[in-house]
């Protein structure tokens, strides 16, 4: 028995190896994960450190904003800067400058005045897409990306406190018809709406659209050319008071200073809700706030687009920064800031407080805005109706290079002639040897469009191409004839449509020697990239005109509307 126990005591059991291997494997995986986490953290910290070092330096994104919301945009910019934004290894700082949209448009398309407007912006927040459309009509390359609304503001009628309750049933479509306060059961005399120039005042432009629209709109090129629309424009222009302030801001000032209804020389004026808020709460607020009346029916709405600008002055870092800031402006926290500044946004119903004179009445239906081209045509149609209209002489290039473009040019001219309510219109053509040795020919002398409408349309239909392009000689003759026929008290202008440089005849210096200053503006619509833009700009600046650059002929109609909508 003892021997058997001794033998059993010498037997050793083996330990299985697989549990040990599993434990070792798990430990190695854990250590590997820790090492990778540590290494990733180090890399992240190094990346963050490199980003914060801004290896490419600092970059300033300059944003020009319409005065009514410039303060709110600056507040959003401060919130954005607090996130320490870095774009393409540039630390981005935002600089917001308050500037009227009309001044920004003029600066972008002519010569930028830094003393007046600050440095040229990389992004722009006007009060309406109308301004982006105008910029695109003048030079599409300056619009870097599609505009994006950051908030809205309905257009109201600003009225003295006593008049506001009386206007509770007023509709925008009443404007052409109502000329007396008796319509509203009062004896205050003449009822008139001050309509500051719609080419430079958004509220006026949108109010005119609403007056012309059937139902909720939109106004179309076809409806604008109808007899009914021309009759409405004629009535509306006839109802305008004798002395209209140049800007909505001036009109509000006159109304606010008036002790009684109509003491300002007019009864009411269109204004965006946020502009009225600024007027009633700003440094020059009236002792009694003006009251904003939301007319019944579809409401015209200013959409406050963010426009990233293009062009050679905007670098890649600024392009990316402009896109980044645009996205930030539509985030909920930024929208709350804009709402406190007086814009309406979808994410909150917060309103500024106090907000004297403004009830923040709900907008139940928006007016459907006209498209970009029709918008320009509405402004030019108004210009043709207001104060007897303009005196316009068109000089059309019919050189052979215009052959694939001529049909679109004809269509644009026919449309303008059809839509013109009043004013005078004339048509010339140029190439080489069109009238004997002359490179130009007067097809219809400049005269009242109502008398010459059919003759003008026949002349447009008869345009056909010919050899050569003696622009300067032709322009000198056309300009001299227009100057001889100058009509005092009206806007007089020569509009040249061309796609190339002058290739014969007198030179630029000889042409400029024949110009008489800025009483008769010469404006150019330049199609494509073959024109001598520097020379055209030189001529336009001497005469107070403009140069619209369209990349292809499809933009001619909008550009023509834009040119003819301005008063200078």
Image (tube, rainbow, N blue to C red):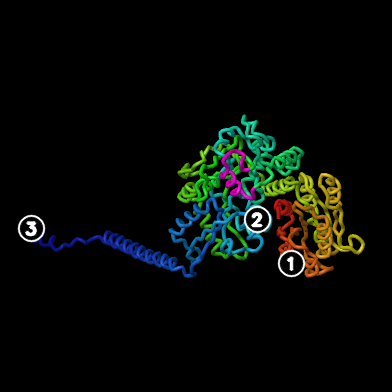
Q: Going 71% across and 67% down the picture, which residue do you hit?
A: 534
Position of 500 compared to 103: left or right? right
* Pointer 1 residue: 535
The C terminus: image quadrant? bottom right
Q: CA distance from mark 3 to mark 2?
A: 113 Å
- 165 shown above or below 6: above
Given the current orientation, which residue lies at the most extreme left position?
Answer: 2
Which residue reaches farthest right?
A: 436
Q: Is residue 524 above or below residue 194?
A: below
Report helix, strand or loop for mark 3: loop
Callout 2 secondary element: helix
Q: Which residues are magenta?
A: 245-264
What residue lies at 66% left-to-right and 55% top-to-bottom?
136
**Going from the N terminus, do you reach mark 2 or mark 1 first?**
2
Which residue bears the numbered disc 2? 135
Q: Check disc 1 and report its element: helix, strand or loop.
A: helix
Q: Earlier in the sequence, mark 3 or mark 2?
A: 3
Question: Which residue was labeled with disc 3?
Answer: 1
Q: Nearer the viewer, mark 1 or mark 3?
A: 1
Q: Is residue 365 left or right of residue 458?
A: left
Question: Which of the two residues, 150 or 388, is positioned nearer the viewer here?
Answer: 388
């Amino acid at each position: 028995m003892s021997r058997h126990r001794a033998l059993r005591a010498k037997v050793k059991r083996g330990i299985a190896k697989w549990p040990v291997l599993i434990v070792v494997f798990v430990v190695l995986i854990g250590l590997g994960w820790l090492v990778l986490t540590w290494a990733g953290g180090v890399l992240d910290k190094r990346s963050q450190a490199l980003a914060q070092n801004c290896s490419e330096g600092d970059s300033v994104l300059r944003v020009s904003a319409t005065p009514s919301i410039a303060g709110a945009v600056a507040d959003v910019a401060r919130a954005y800067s607090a996130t320490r934004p870095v774009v393409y290894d540039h630390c981005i700082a935002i600089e917001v400058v308050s500037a009227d949209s009309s001044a920004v448009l003029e600066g972008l398309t002519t010569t930028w005045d830094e003393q007046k407007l600050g440095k040229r912006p990389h992004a722009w927040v006007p009060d309406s897409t109308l301004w982006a459309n105008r910029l695109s009509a003048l030079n599409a390359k300056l619009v870097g990306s599609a505009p994006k609304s950051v908030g809205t503001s309905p257009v109201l009628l600003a009225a003295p406190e006593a008049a506001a309750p009386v206007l509770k049933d007023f509709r925008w479509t009443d404007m052409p018809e109502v000329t007396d306060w008796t319509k509203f059961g009062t004896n205050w005399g003449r009822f008139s709406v001050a309509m500051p120039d719609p080419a430079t005042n958004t509220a006026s432009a949108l109010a005119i659209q609403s007056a012309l629209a059937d139902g909720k709109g939109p106004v179309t090129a076809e409806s604008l050319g109808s007899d009914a629309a021309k009759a409405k424009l004629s009535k509306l222009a006839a109802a305008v008071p004798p002395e209209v302030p140049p800007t909505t801001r001036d009109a509000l000032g006159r109304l606010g200073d008036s002790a009684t209804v109509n003491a300002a020389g007019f009864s009411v004026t269109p204004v965006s809700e946020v502009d009225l808020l600024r007027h009633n709460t700003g440094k020059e607020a009236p002792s009694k706030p003006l009251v904003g009346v939301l007319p019944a029916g579809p409401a015209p709405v200013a959409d406050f687009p963010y426009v990233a600008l293009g062009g050679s002055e905007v670098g890649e870092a600024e392009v990316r920064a402009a896109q980044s800031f645009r996205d930030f402006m539509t985030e909920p926290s930024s929208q709350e800031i804009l709402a406190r500044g007086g814009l309406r946004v979808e994410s909150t119903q917060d309103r500024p407080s106090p907000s004297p004179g403004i009830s923040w009445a709900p907008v139940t239906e928006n007016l459907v805005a006209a498209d970009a081209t029709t918008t320009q045509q509405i402004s030019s149609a108004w210009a043709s109706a207001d104060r007897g209209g303009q005196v316009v002489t068109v000089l059309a290039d019919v050189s052979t290079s215009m052959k694939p473009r001529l049909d679109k040019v004809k269509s644009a001219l026919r449309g303008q002639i059809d839509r013109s309510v009043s004013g005078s219109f004339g048509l010339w053509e140029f190439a080489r040897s069109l009238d004997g040795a002359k490179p130009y020919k007067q097809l219809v002398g400049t005269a009242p469009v109502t008398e010459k409408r059919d003759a003008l349309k026949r002349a447009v239909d008869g345009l056909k191409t010919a050899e050569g392009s003696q622009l300067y000689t032709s322009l000198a003759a056309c300009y001299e004839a227009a100057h001889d026929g100058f009509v005092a008290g009206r806007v007089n202008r020569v509009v040249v449509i061309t796609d190339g440089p002058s290739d014969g005849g007198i030179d630029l210096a000889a042409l400029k020697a024949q110009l008489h200053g800025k009483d008769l503006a010469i404006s150019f619509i330049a199609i494509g990239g073959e024109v001598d833009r520097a020379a055209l700009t030189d001529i336009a600046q001497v005469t107070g005109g403009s140069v619209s650059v369209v990349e292809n002929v499809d933009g001619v109609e909008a550009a023509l509307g834009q040119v003819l909508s301005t008063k200078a």
